Amino acid sequence: QVQLVESGGGLVQTGGSLRLSCAASGRTFSGYAMGWFRQAPGKEREFLATISWSGSNTYYADSVKGRFTIARDNAKNTVYLLMNSLTPEDTAVYYCAASPTSSYRWVPAAEYEYDSWGQGTQVTVSS
């Protein structure tokens, strides 16, 4: 497994933007597809976006497509989530996760496909 630490959360107004970062350590970062999930109070954890270990493929949930962008820098062992046009409905704890794979194009969207999780970072969007 790989150790993951998220950062970049905070309080933002409606319409604002945030960039979340997730730093990985412990294993070869490029051997993992990476994903972002979130969990709002009283709701189940929700898939948001994923990126293949090569960075060539991405996949987004419909709820964030066109507003959120996932990217990775394998030289820095870091994956990012750029979030634009935020609304109060985006308020949640955001988690990054790692999925081991030998496929450079694989973009997993299910929780069970990930074996490493960060501790989460809180994002609060005020109205």
Image (cartoon, rainbow, N blue to C red):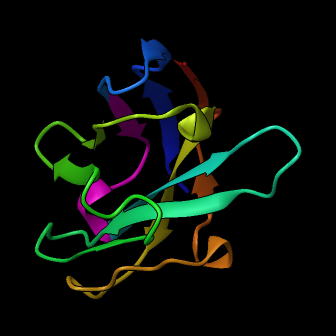
The one nearer the camera, 108 or 88, is 88
Compared with residue 93, is residue 106 higher up or lower down, i.e. above or below? below
**Residue at the spot 50% in from the left edge and 39% down from the top edge:** 4
Q: Residue 115: x percent and y percent?
A: 62, 65
**Residue at the spot 20% in from the left edge and 82% down from the top edge:** 104
Residue 28 part of the magenta-drawn span? yes
The one nearer the camera, 19 or 99, is 19
**Residue at the spot 56% in from the left edge and 64% down from the top edge:** 47
Q: Residue 31: x percent and y percent?
A: 31, 68
- On the rendered structure, is 29 left or right of 76? right
Specify the quadrant of the image occupied by residue 73. top left
Compared with residue 1, is residue 101 higher up or lower down, i.e. above or below? below
Residue 53 part of the magenta-drawn span? no
- On the rendered structure, is 28 left or right of 91? left
The one nearer the camera, 29 or 88, is 88
Q: Residue 26: x percent and y percent?
A: 44, 43
The quarter of the picture where the C terminus appears is top right
Compared with residue 7, is residue 69 higher up or lower down, i.e. above or below? below
Compared with residue 12, is residue 59 higher up or lower down, i.e. above or below? below
Q: Residue 123: x percent and y percent?
A: 55, 25
- Specify start and end residues of the magenta stretch as a single range: 19-31
- On the rendered structure, is 109 left or right of 103? right
The one nearer the camera, 125 or 24, is 125
